[in-house]
Amino acid sequence: MLSILAVTAPFFALVAAGYAAGRLHLLPESAIPGLNVFVQCFALPAMLLRLAMATPISQLLDPAVLLCWLGAAALVVGLVLAVSWRRAGLKNASFGALVATFPNSGFMGVPLLVGLLGPQAAGPTIAVLLIDVFVTSSLCIALAQAGDAAGHGTRRALALALRGAFGNPLPWATALGALFSVAGVGLPGPVNVLVRMLAEAATPVALFTVGAVLWRAGQRAGHGTRWGGVAAITAVKLFVHPALVAALALALIALGVPLSPEQALVLTLAAALPSASNVPLLAERYRADAGPVARVVMVSTALAFFSFSALVAWMGVQPG
């Protein structure tokens, strides 16, 4: 267990440091968007570019991995919508489903899972990120807009959501890295040094930014949040989601689908990550009630240090 905590504790400590910097006003709130831009548009794309270049494209787009993750995501989205649609309305229920399904695979998952399991974890983790950016997020946003009386229908809402997904630089960096991998070529010397420097900055700055974003989200969450709903969705994210992924992975393996136990392990641990920190921003953008969503991200991140580490130990993972 100590060897696991030696890997996981620094990641969550950096998140806590970012939160503390915001809370103690060491980091101005006006600086947080700049940090987010650096991570989202420069550092993380550089890291994903390098990882994709070193990963065979068959691992980035493995049909068995895609089937397992999509199947579990559909079950979680359906479960949350079925429970909360009438009480919260379609728009708020849709973002509740998204925050219960979308793990923090970009800012936290890729470096953490690669650190725990080695470079072979990169392919499935990046595949998870691509699915959540293009499919899960787009579907939930389209559902949210479909319930808006001022909207223009589900088809237009889905088109707008997909446009936003294609505007995300992370998939494009992954696609470029995959092209380099297929072509068997590398980056020119000075460009390679620049990309490596940006990639090395990605993990610490991304995690620090997550903490700062969580502090800002807590400031804006308000005091009228129903904690019962927050606790339920947090439980779905940290426990139900990984359990469904693990169960579906075992079922697919039993049916002869070529999903390896190692891939199933990566997917299960990815599902056990806390909720993605950008979901409250999406909820705000589409005028949903972002307070409960922000609380879920905060609580799931705080609890995931214990639940994620315990799951890693229970599954017998030995950090590489």
Image (cartoon, grey):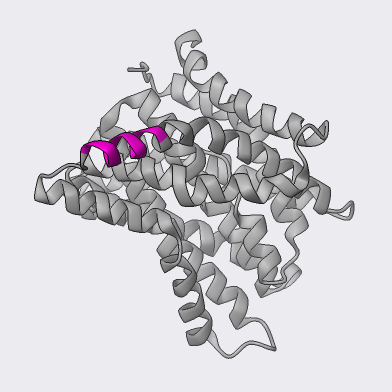
Q: What residue lies at 36% left-to-right and 57% top-to-bottom?
A: 171
Q: Is residue 123 visible?
A: no
Q: What residue lies at 37% left-to-right and 40% top-to-bottom?
A: 47
Depicted 148 relative to depicted 165: above or below: below
Q: Nearer the viewer, residue 305 or 195?
A: 195
Q: Quadrant of residue 264?
A: top left
Q: What residue lies at 45% left-to-right and 19% top-to-bottom?
A: 313
Q: Nearer the viewer, residue 278 or 46?
A: 46
Q: What residue lies at 59% left-to-right and 82% top-to-bottom?
A: 146
Tell me the magenta residue range: 189-197
Q: Quadrant of residue 162?
A: bottom left
Instruction: Report whether 159 appears left or right of 292.
Output: left
Q: Quadrant of residue 19?
A: top right
Q: Nearer the viewer, residue 89 or 281?
A: 281
Instruction: Report whether 149 appears left or right of 228.
Output: left
Magenta-span inclusion, residue 190: yes
Please identify the residue farthest to the left as the structure is shown: 184
Main secondary structure found in the magenta portion: helix
Magenta-span inclusion, residue 134: no
Depicted 203 relative to depicted 46: above or below: above
Q: Where residue 119 sits: x, y (%)?
A: 28, 30
Q: Where residue 177 sits: x, y (%)?
A: 25, 49
Q: Where residue 127 sits: x, y (%)?
A: 33, 50
